[in-house]
Image (cartoon, rainbow, N blue to C red):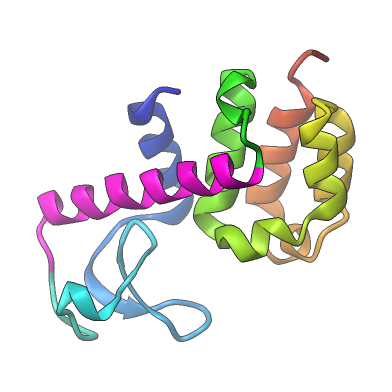
Amino acid sequence: MEYAVLAHQLRSDEGERFAVYSDSRGVASVGVGHRVVSADHLRRGDRISQARSARYLRQDIEIAVGICVALWLVCHTYPDEVQQVLVQMAFGLGQRGLAHFTAFHTAIAHRHWQVAARHGRQSRWYRQVPQRAERLMARLEAVPPA
């Protein structure tokens, strides 16, 4: 999976902010959707460099990849497009959120990309971020059957 492509897609979807802000749920965030934790030693309004934002993004992508591996042990064998979609979903939803997509999870595990896309469209996540979710589900749906 190409890190640079994934980072570009996430920057496009999430945006990038160099000052700590409150996200739509009131959670302190910075960079490309990075959730600020105590170890970051940041408060709302603090600024970070572009290099620090890039470090957070790389760490957060690695976490999202780890989530995908935890949910689908063989996800590294899936087509690159599927891996990118799953990592983007894990990036935004986290492990607990993505694990709740049980029918989606089963369809992915059976390599039924089109069925998984249908289930993704039936989720609350899809209603919350419809443009992003539709773009991801359309990409998933376009992957040829395994």
- Indicate the quadrant containing the N terminus: top left, top right, bottom left or bottom right: top left
Can see residue 131? yes
- Indicate the quadrant containing the C terminus: top left, top right, bottom left or bottom right: top right
Instruction: Give the answer, above or below, for where 82 lies relative to 12.
Output: above
Instruction: Give the answer, above or below, for where 29 lies relative to 122.
Output: below
Residue 3, percent from left and from top: 36, 29
What residue is shown at x 54% (from left), y 44% (from top)? 88
Q: Is residue 59 magenta?
A: yes
In this image, 113 relative to 72: left or right?
right
In this image, 127 relative to 88: left or right?
right
In this image, 61 relative to 143: left or right?
left
Q: Nearer the viewer, residue 130 or 105?
A: 105
Which image quarter: residue 107? Answer: top right
Q: Main secondary structure of the magenta part?
A: helix
What residue is shown at x 63% (from left), y 18% (from top)? 79
Q: How many marks?
A: 0
Residue 101, percent from left and from top: 78, 55
What residue is shown at x 43% (from left), y 45% (from top)? 10
Can see residue 11? no
Residue 134, percent from left and from top: 73, 44
Instruction: Give the answer, above or below, for where 10 lies relative to 33.
Output: above
Bounds of the magenta segment = 48-71
What residue is shown at x 41% (from left), y 50% (from top)? 63
Residue 46, percent from left and from top: 14, 79
